[in-house]
Every structure is written in structure tokens, then in C-alpha cells.
Amino acid sequence: MANQIELLLDLDDKEFNKEKTKDIEIKRLSDKTKKPFFITIKSLSPERIYELQDKSYDKNGNVVMGKFYDGALNGCSEAIVSPDFNDTRLKHKLGLSDTALKKDVLMRVFKVNEINEINSEIMDISGFNKDVGEEIKN
């Protein structure tokens, strides 16, 4: 068997910190616009994921749903790279000011379950998927 460290040393440095992206169709918006509506998300670092999750708990370690949703919105705000939800025309259409945060726009564009689904996809491409144990075994 080849020296495992040599195999790692032969990899491009970028492989270790490679940012992943994924296109996700938002079916409800595709149906409404009568055209495929996709967003592009990127992976977040494990440190950032943990930081967002930590804010979702109370002092007793219980999940606080309002804080969890806010964390999911913040994660989506950071991870959605396309389309540009900071577009002032969209903010005006939604009745928001030019200075409104991206998460305020996302809260109006997406339903709660869609935010949760997008957040789940972000977790998956960031390496927090449920199937990682199976991948390691194989």
C-alpha cells in the first residue's frame, strides 16, 4: 500500500480548503415565475457553522426556535451567492429600504420551510451531511 502521507502531499493545496458550490431549484418560485428558479449556495467553514449553531441554544442547551431560524437566515445570507438578494430593486419591490439586510430580503422571498431546506443543503455541502459515516466506511 502506498504511503498515505505521500498521497496527501501529492494533492493540490486547494483540495484541503476547497469551497464547494451547488445550484438549488426553488420549486415554488419556479412554479410562480413559470421559469426555472435556481439559487447558488457555497459551503461555509466548520467554525462558522458552529458559531451560527451556538447562537441557537439557551443557557441550558435547549434549542430556541426563534434563534435557530435567525441562525439559519444568517447562514443562508452568507452562503447564497446568486442571485444577488441585495439588489435595491428587489428591496423596493418588497417594501424594504436600500439599507435592509440580505437576511431581511430572504425572510420575505422564502418561506420558513424553504430557509430550512436551503440551510440543510448548506450544511450538506459544508461537510455536515448525514451520510459521511457511510462515505468513510466505503
Image (cartoon, grey):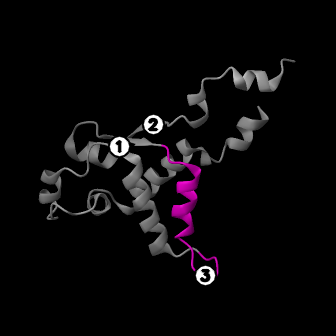
Which tag, 2 or 1, sits closer to the chain's start? 2
Answer above or below: position of 102 versus 7.
Answer: below
Quadrant (top left, top right, bottom left, bottom right) of the N terminus: top right
Report crowding for label 1: few under 14, some 14 to 19, many 20 or more residues within 10 A (C-alpha).
some
Q: Residue at x 23, y 36 (%)?
A: 35
Rate crowding at label 2 as few (under 14), some (14 to 19) or many (20 or more) other CA atoms within 10 Å.
some
The residues colored magenta run: 43-62
Horizontal side of 16 relative to 34 (left or right) equals right
Q: Amino acid at mark 2?
A: Thr
Mark 2 in CB contact with mark 3 (< 8 angstroms): no
Which residue in the protein does label 2 denote? 21
The relative height of residue 102 versus residue 133 in the rendered view (above or below) is below
Q: Residue furthest top?
A: 2
Q: Bin the neighbour count of mark 3 within 10 Å (Cα to Cα): few under 14, some 14-19, many 20 and up.
A: few
Residue type, mark 1 in image: Val
Q: Quadrant of residue 63?
A: bottom right
Say what amino acid the circle numbered 3 marks.
Lys
State how many labels appear.
3
Contact (Cβ within 8 Å) of mark 2 with mark 1:
yes
| Residue marked by disc 1 | 81
Q: Secondary structure at mark 2?
A: strand
Ranked by sequence position, the earlier of labels 2 and 3 is: 2
Q: Write down the residue under mark 3.
A: 59
Q: Is residue 57 magenta?
A: yes
Question: Image quadrant for the C terminus?
Answer: top right
Report the Cα–Cα distance between label 2 and label 1.
9 Å
**Left or right side of 95 for 117:** right
**Residue 6's spot in the image, x, y percent?**
77, 21
